[in-house]
Amino acid sequence: MCNTIYNLNQTVADFTKERAHMNETFRIVRSERHEFLKHISAIHFLLEQNNPDDAKQYLDELVSQYEETNLSIKGERGTIAGVLHHMYQLAKKENIDAVYDIDVPISTLPINDKDLVTLIGNLLSNSIEACMEWRKKHHQNPFLSLQFYKRSGLYVLLCKNSSLPIPNDILDDLFRSYGNTTKEGDHQGLGTMLIDEMVKKHNGHLDFTYKNEEFTVKIKIPAIQ
């Protein structure tokens, strides 16, 4: 009974968090659309005043801002767009050089939204935390990249990030059992276990490698379940 109540409370908490992420994403989109004509007017004024260099700089900054939002939401369902955008903004806030290279929407995966948010959310949050620890030691901006594409009946999700050295005993059992984590301090390694559970649940395959302070996770999911 206690486990059932705990699981229900956790589900409610997860849905509340996902809704907050989704609402924030679409708040940003509405705000950008609301301000669009004002930006056009500003550029038009600069051009009228014969300030093409200032107009170009203004436009470059505007396009960069719009591209950040578009990277996360293009073609995605609301919940997936929300978690992608939230994680991208979090990475930027932590001075992580984050790149999304999404060939087809991640929402096209034959996985329900709840499982997909669990998979993507844990994958990106683990990467961001590893990047933050790497930055503390090296005092440089770490990197994070997320690629997604479809090849020969398989969806491929590839996540790479900066990472401090991982002991071999942890690396050997990573993603295979509860309690293994690449992070320092009091971390339980639950995220890696949840990622592995989601991949197995949907008949996928997970590989990971670590080399030269770069950690890579490659996930393949069949297009037809």
Image (cartoon, rainbow, N blue to C red):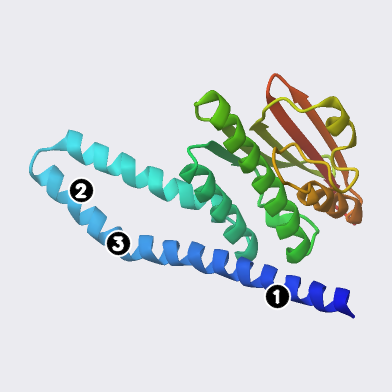
Q: How far apart, in angstroms, are the residues tagged by discs 2 and 3?
A: 13 Å
- Residue 155 in the image, given as x and y percentages of width and height: 79, 45
Task: Read off the residue under disc 1.
Answer: 12
Give the vertical position of 203 relative to 21 (above or below): above
Sequence-first disc among 3 and 1: 1
Q: How many C-alpha atoms fall within 10 Å of the one at disc 1: few (<14), some, or many (≥20)?
A: few
Q: Residue at x 90, y 45 (%)?
A: 177
Residue 101 visible? The answer is yes
Which is nearer the eye, 63 or 89? 89
Disc 1 residue type? Val
Sequence-first disc among 2 and 3: 3
Task: Read off the residue under disc 2.
Answer: 43
> Marks 2 and 1: in contact by CB < 8 Å?
no
Classify residue 24 as left or right of residue 149: left
Q: How far apart, in angstroms, are the residues tagged by discs 3 and 1?
A: 34 Å
Question: In this view, which residue lies farthest toward the top?
Answer: 212
- Residue 131 in the image, given as x and y percentages of width and height: 60, 35
Q: Which callout, 2 or 3, points to the residue nearer the camera?
A: 3
Question: In this view, which residue lies farthest toward the left?
Answer: 49
Sequence-first disc among 1 and 2: 1
Q: How many C-alpha atoms fall within 10 Å of the one at disc 3: few (<14), some, or many (≥20)?
A: few
Q: Residue at x 59, y 70 (%)?
A: 19
Q: Which callout, 3 or 1, points to the residue nearer the camera?
A: 1
Disc 3 residue type? Glu
Give the vertical position of 12 relative to 192 (above or below): below
Image quadrant holding the C terminus, namely bottom right
Quadrant of residue 128 in the image?
top right
